[in-house]
Image: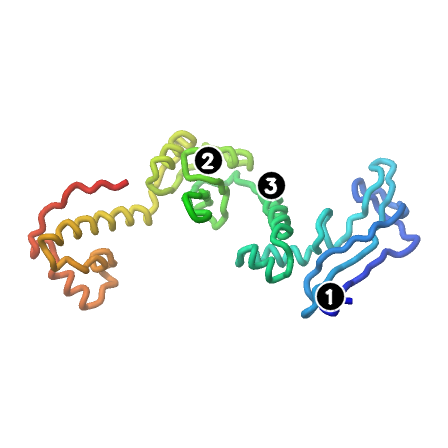
């Protein structure tokens, strides 16, 4: 026997009556049994399994059914406590790392995650959603993107979908309605200055106020400031290596940086206007 493995074996009491797992009819006798095994949480250093002979009952209304066990959901090879642990770890670690940690194939763990995510999504109620923020993020190397839609009044992610074009907003609209939300309830949407996102909002949420988020606005402003500095440093070499002095919040400058910034004012340098700035 494997000394690193612990097996817990369970059986139901003989002559006991069982309720139908479908309709709840009581007083049924076990027709036969089938032995099943579930992976459980480790007991100290031991990999632990629960094995039980699960009875089947014959109900006049529902036919022959396997009795549900209280420690695992139907169709799963894991106990509820083990699945709860996996869902807790999935919020903090990649699934491959969890699989290596618990000694299970990642495909089996993904089945657990998909089950509870889909269950949670089915129960989601978006009827109170009024303010939505969304942005794209890279899902893996290359040009592979996922757009995330969040409720601005709380931390919840409302919807995630592949891509970063206008169709992502259209798919969000369909999902919002499917979960009890309404287009007319959305008062404000916040995103970056992507023409595709702007088009998606205008086509699908025409009554919503569109706000560009501060992060992306400041990014464009900072790029414009650096564009001017690069253009001017050809005539003013003192601007070389001053990039971060211009981009840093003045309140966060050191005394040395603040003094240098003071010497680089437009008036003292007599800087000319830079060439037109074109931002994509």
Q: Nearer the viewer, residue 274 or 119?
A: 274
Q: Is residue 88 left or right of residue 54?
A: left
Q: Which mark is residue 122?
A: 3
Residue 176 location (% of width, % of height): 51, 36
| Quadrant of the rendered image containing residue 43 | bottom right
Quadrant that contains the C terminus: top left
Residue at the disc numbered 1: 5
The CA distance from mark 3 to mark 1 is: 37 Å
Given this view, does label 3 or label 2 mark the residue nearer the observer? 3
The CA distance from mark 2 to mark 1 is: 55 Å
Q: Is residue 74 left or right of residue 222?
A: right
Residue neighbourhood size for the residue with mark 1, other residues' Cα within 10 Å, grouped as few (<14), some (14–19), many (≥20): few
Q: Residue at x 48, y 50 (%)?
A: 155
Please tell me whether mark 2 sits on a helix, a strand or a loop.
Answer: helix
Q: Which mark sits nearer the N-terminus, 3 or 2? A: 3
Residue 84 location (% of width, % of height): 64, 56
């Amino acid at each position: 026997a494997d000394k690193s493995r612990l097996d817990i074996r369970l059986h139901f009491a003989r002559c006991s009556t069982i309720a139908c797992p479908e309709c709840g009819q009581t007083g049924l006798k076990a027709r036969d049994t089938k032995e099943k095994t579930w992976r459980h949480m480790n007991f100290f250093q031991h990999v632990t399994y629960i094995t039980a002979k699960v009875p089947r009952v014959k109900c006049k209304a529902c036919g022959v059914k396997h009795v549900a066990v209280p420690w695992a959901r139907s169709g799963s090879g894991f106990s509820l406590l083990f699945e709860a642990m996996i869902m807790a770890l999935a919020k903090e670690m990649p699934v491959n790392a969890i699989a290596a940690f618990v000694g299970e194939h990642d495909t089996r763990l993904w089945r657990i995650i998909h089950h509870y995510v889909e269950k949670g999504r089915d129960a989601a109620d978006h009827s109170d959603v009024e303010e939505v923020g969304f942005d794209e993020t890279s899902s893996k190397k290359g040009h592979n993107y996922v757009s995330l839609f969040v409720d601005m009044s709380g931390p919840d992610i409302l919807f995630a979908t592949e891509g970063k074009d206008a169709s992502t907003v259209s798919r969000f609209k369909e999902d919002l309605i499917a979960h009890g939300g309404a287009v007319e309830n959305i008062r404000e949407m916040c995103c970056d200055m992507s023409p595709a996102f702007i088009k998606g909002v205008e086509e699908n949420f025409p009554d919503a106020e569109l706000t560009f988020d501060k992060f992306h606005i400041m990014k464009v402003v900072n790029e414009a400031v650096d564009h001017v500095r690069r253009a001017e440093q050809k005539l003013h070499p003192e601007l070389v290596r001053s990039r971060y002095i211009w981009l840093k919040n003045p309140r966060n400058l050191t005394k040395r940086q603040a003094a240098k910034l003071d010497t680089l004012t437009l008036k003292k340098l007599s800087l000319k206007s830079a060439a037109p700035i074109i931002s994509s």
